Amino acid sequence: MGNPDTLLPMDGDEAHGSPRLRRGGRVHATNEGDVMNPSCIFCEIVRGVAPAFKVYEDEHTLTFMDAFPVTDGHTLVVTKAHCTDLFDASPPLLQAVMATAKRVAHALREVVRPDGLMVFQLNGAAAGQTVFHYHMHLMPRTSGEPLMLHSRSAGDPGRLRALATALSAAMPHA
Ligand code: 5GP
Ligand code: ZN
Protein backbone atom coordinates (compact mmCIF):
# COMPACT_ATOMS: atom_id res chain seq x y z
CA MET A 1 0.00 0.00 0.00
CA GLY A 2 1.70 3.15 -1.25
CA ASN A 3 5.26 4.33 -0.91
CA PRO A 4 6.71 3.16 2.43
CA ASP A 5 8.17 6.64 2.93
CA THR A 6 4.68 8.09 3.17
CA LEU A 7 3.66 5.48 5.72
CA LEU A 8 6.14 6.66 8.32
CA PRO A 9 4.89 8.83 11.19
CA MET A 10 4.74 12.48 10.21
CA ASP A 11 7.72 14.49 11.28
CA GLY A 12 7.36 17.65 9.27
CA ASP A 13 5.48 20.09 11.47
CA GLU A 14 7.84 21.58 14.00
CA ALA A 15 5.05 23.26 15.94
CA HIS A 16 2.65 20.35 16.28
CA GLY A 17 4.60 17.16 15.53
CA SER A 18 5.30 14.42 18.04
CA PRO A 19 7.80 15.32 20.76
CA ARG A 20 8.83 11.64 20.82
CA LEU A 21 10.11 11.81 17.28
CA ARG A 22 12.35 14.66 18.26
CA ARG A 23 13.65 13.34 21.58
CA GLY A 24 17.05 12.10 20.44
CA GLY A 25 17.42 8.35 20.20
CA ARG A 26 14.11 7.32 21.76
CA VAL A 27 12.51 6.38 18.49
CA HIS A 28 14.54 4.54 15.92
CA ALA A 29 14.04 2.84 12.56
CA THR A 30 15.91 -0.28 11.58
CA ASN A 31 14.17 -0.62 8.21
CA GLU A 32 11.96 1.63 6.15
CA GLY A 33 8.60 1.78 7.91
CA ASP A 34 10.01 0.05 10.99
CA VAL A 35 9.90 2.78 13.63
CA MET A 36 10.02 1.65 17.24
CA ASN A 37 10.01 3.24 20.66
CA PRO A 38 11.87 0.94 23.06
CA SER A 39 9.83 2.08 26.07
CA CYS A 40 6.42 1.56 24.43
CA ILE A 41 4.31 -1.49 25.33
CA PHE A 42 2.63 -1.63 21.90
CA CYS A 43 6.04 -1.49 20.16
CA GLU A 44 7.03 -4.43 22.37
CA ILE A 45 3.92 -6.33 21.27
CA VAL A 46 4.68 -5.51 17.61
CA ARG A 47 8.24 -6.78 18.10
CA GLY A 48 6.96 -9.93 19.81
CA VAL A 49 8.78 -9.07 23.06
CA ALA A 50 5.56 -8.60 25.06
CA PRO A 51 2.72 -11.14 24.79
CA ALA A 52 -0.65 -10.46 23.20
CA PHE A 53 -3.53 -12.48 21.81
CA LYS A 54 -3.01 -11.56 18.17
CA VAL A 55 -5.84 -11.59 15.65
CA TYR A 56 -4.32 -10.30 12.45
CA GLU A 57 -1.19 -8.75 11.05
CA ASP A 58 -0.22 -7.15 7.75
CA GLU A 59 2.56 -4.91 6.54
CA HIS A 60 1.51 -1.82 8.48
CA THR A 61 -0.98 -2.89 11.16
CA LEU A 62 -1.32 -5.38 14.00
CA THR A 63 -4.61 -6.39 15.64
CA PHE A 64 -4.82 -7.99 19.09
CA MET A 65 -7.24 -8.36 21.99
CA ASP A 66 -7.33 -5.56 24.56
CA ALA A 67 -5.84 -7.04 27.76
CA PHE A 68 -8.38 -5.11 29.89
CA PRO A 69 -11.52 -5.48 27.79
CA VAL A 70 -14.45 -3.22 28.55
CA THR A 71 -16.73 -5.61 26.68
CA ASP A 72 -16.41 -9.11 25.26
CA GLY A 73 -14.45 -8.85 22.01
CA HIS A 74 -12.77 -5.49 22.73
CA THR A 75 -10.02 -5.39 20.10
CA LEU A 76 -7.23 -2.95 19.21
CA VAL A 77 -5.77 -2.18 15.78
CA VAL A 78 -2.34 -0.54 16.09
CA THR A 79 0.20 0.82 13.64
CA LYS A 80 3.35 -1.30 13.44
CA ALA A 81 5.45 1.84 13.27
CA HIS A 82 5.49 3.89 16.44
CA CYS A 83 3.46 7.06 16.16
CA THR A 84 1.80 8.73 19.07
CA ASP A 85 -1.63 9.79 17.92
CA LEU A 86 -3.78 11.12 15.08
CA PHE A 87 -1.60 14.20 14.76
CA ASP A 88 1.55 12.14 14.45
CA ALA A 89 0.37 9.38 12.07
CA SER A 90 0.61 9.86 8.30
CA PRO A 91 -2.66 9.72 6.31
CA PRO A 92 -1.64 6.52 4.46
CA LEU A 93 -0.92 4.83 7.81
CA LEU A 94 -4.31 5.97 9.10
CA GLN A 95 -5.90 4.51 5.99
CA ALA A 96 -4.15 1.21 6.62
CA VAL A 97 -5.53 1.13 10.19
CA MET A 98 -9.06 1.92 9.03
CA ALA A 99 -8.92 -0.71 6.29
CA THR A 100 -7.91 -3.31 8.88
CA ALA A 101 -10.51 -2.02 11.36
CA LYS A 102 -13.28 -2.55 8.81
CA ARG A 103 -12.26 -6.17 8.32
CA VAL A 104 -11.98 -6.75 12.08
CA ALA A 105 -15.42 -5.18 12.47
CA HIS A 106 -16.91 -7.77 10.10
CA ALA A 107 -15.15 -10.55 12.00
CA LEU A 108 -16.46 -9.20 15.33
CA ARG A 109 -19.98 -9.02 13.97
CA GLU A 110 -19.78 -12.64 12.88
CA VAL A 111 -18.09 -14.00 16.04
CA VAL A 112 -19.55 -11.87 18.85
CA ARG A 113 -22.86 -10.86 17.21
CA PRO A 114 -23.15 -7.64 19.27
CA ASP A 115 -26.06 -5.21 19.14
CA GLY A 116 -23.64 -2.52 17.98
CA LEU A 117 -19.97 -1.77 17.53
CA MET A 118 -18.18 1.26 18.94
CA VAL A 119 -15.03 2.35 17.08
CA PHE A 120 -12.95 5.05 18.73
CA GLN A 121 -9.49 6.45 19.14
CA LEU A 122 -8.20 8.80 21.85
CA ASN A 123 -5.62 11.56 21.41
CA GLY A 124 -3.78 12.93 24.44
CA ALA A 125 -4.15 12.27 28.16
CA ALA A 126 -6.90 14.88 28.40
CA ALA A 127 -8.92 12.81 25.93
CA GLY A 128 -8.32 9.66 27.99
CA GLN A 129 -5.41 8.19 25.99
CA THR A 130 -3.31 5.93 28.19
CA VAL A 131 -1.01 4.20 25.69
CA PHE A 132 0.77 6.73 23.51
CA HIS A 133 1.12 4.59 20.40
CA TYR A 134 -1.57 5.14 17.76
CA HIS A 135 -4.39 2.59 18.03
CA MET A 136 -8.06 2.21 17.28
CA HIS A 137 -10.51 0.50 19.63
CA LEU A 138 -13.25 -1.79 18.34
CA MET A 139 -15.69 -2.41 21.16
CA PRO A 140 -18.76 -4.61 20.68
CA ARG A 141 -21.75 -3.12 22.47
CA THR A 142 -24.89 -4.58 24.02
CA SER A 143 -28.05 -2.48 24.18
CA GLY A 144 -28.50 -0.76 27.54
CA GLU A 145 -24.92 -1.35 28.76
CA PRO A 146 -23.29 1.70 30.39
CA LEU A 147 -20.79 3.48 28.13
CA MET A 148 -17.23 3.08 29.36
CA LEU A 149 -13.89 3.66 27.61
CA HIS A 150 -11.62 1.68 29.94
CA SER A 151 -11.67 -1.20 32.40
CA ARG A 152 -9.34 -2.06 35.27
CA SER A 153 -10.06 -5.80 35.09
CA ALA A 154 -7.80 -8.04 33.06
CA GLY A 155 -9.61 -10.26 30.59
CA ASP A 156 -9.78 -14.02 31.11
CA PRO A 157 -6.81 -15.40 29.12
CA GLY A 158 -8.81 -18.42 27.93
CA ARG A 159 -11.57 -16.21 26.59
CA LEU A 160 -9.12 -13.78 24.97
CA ARG A 161 -7.30 -16.64 23.28
CA ALA A 162 -10.55 -18.18 22.02
CA LEU A 163 -11.73 -14.81 20.68
CA ALA A 164 -8.40 -14.13 18.95
CA THR A 165 -8.52 -17.54 17.25
CA ALA A 166 -12.15 -17.17 16.17
CA LEU A 167 -11.70 -13.59 14.95
CA SER A 168 -8.59 -14.52 13.04
CA ALA A 169 -10.49 -17.29 11.23
CA ALA A 170 -13.41 -14.94 10.52
CA MET A 171 -11.33 -12.11 8.98
CA PRO A 172 -12.72 -11.40 5.51
CA HIS A 173 -10.32 -11.06 2.58
CA ALA A 174 -8.95 -7.57 1.89
P1 5GP B 1 -6.13 4.23 25.25
O1 5GP B 1 -6.57 4.64 26.61
O2 5GP B 1 -4.68 4.65 25.05
O3 5GP B 1 -7.03 4.68 24.14
O4 5GP B 1 -6.21 2.66 25.21
C1 5GP B 1 -5.18 1.82 25.60
C2 5GP B 1 -5.78 0.44 25.67
O5 5GP B 1 -4.71 -0.48 25.75
C3 5GP B 1 -6.66 0.20 26.90
O6 5GP B 1 -7.94 -0.23 26.50
C4 5GP B 1 -5.90 -0.85 27.70
O7 5GP B 1 -6.77 -1.77 28.31
C5 5GP B 1 -5.05 -1.51 26.64
N1 5GP B 1 -3.79 -2.03 27.13
C6 5GP B 1 -2.93 -1.44 27.99
N2 5GP B 1 -1.83 -2.19 28.17
C7 5GP B 1 -2.00 -3.29 27.39
C8 5GP B 1 -1.21 -4.45 27.15
O8 5GP B 1 -0.10 -4.61 27.68
N3 5GP B 1 -1.70 -5.38 26.28
C9 5GP B 1 -2.91 -5.22 25.67
N4 5GP B 1 -3.30 -6.20 24.85
N5 5GP B 1 -3.70 -4.15 25.89
C10 5GP B 1 -3.25 -3.19 26.73
ZN1 ZN C 1 5.08 2.31 20.19
Image: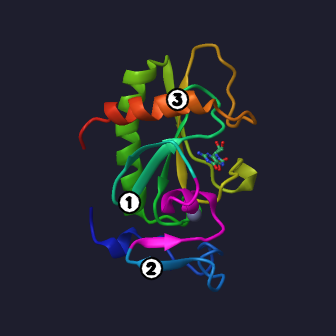
Query: Mark 3 vs ligand 1: CB under 8 Å?
Result: no
**The C terminus sits in image quarter:** top left
Is the N terminus in the top left, top right, bottom left or bottom right quadrant?
bottom left
Q: Secondary structure at mark 3?
A: loop
Query: What amino acid is at disc 1?
Result: His
The residue carrying pointer 2 sits among few (fewer than 14), some (14 to 19) or many (20 or more) residues within 10 Å by Cα, namely few
- Front in this rendered view, residue 63 or 145: 63
Residue 19: x percent and y percent?
65, 75
Q: Using the image, determine if residue 3 lies above or below residue 125.
A: below
Crowding near pointer 1: few (<14 within 10 Å), some, many (20+)?
A: many
Mark 3, Cα crowd under 10 Å, few <14 / some 14-19 / many 20+, is many
Instruction: Residue 96 in the image: state x and y as whole percent.
Output: 37, 54
Between 89 and 45, which is closer to the camera in this rendering? 45
| Nearest-to-viewer mark from 2 and 1 | 2
The earlier-in-sequence mark between 3 and 2 is: 2
Residue under the image location 66 percent in, 37 percent down: 68
> Label for residue 73?
3
34 and 23: which is toward the camera: 34
Residue 55 place in picture, x, y as percent? 42, 41
Which numbered circle lies on residue 60? 1
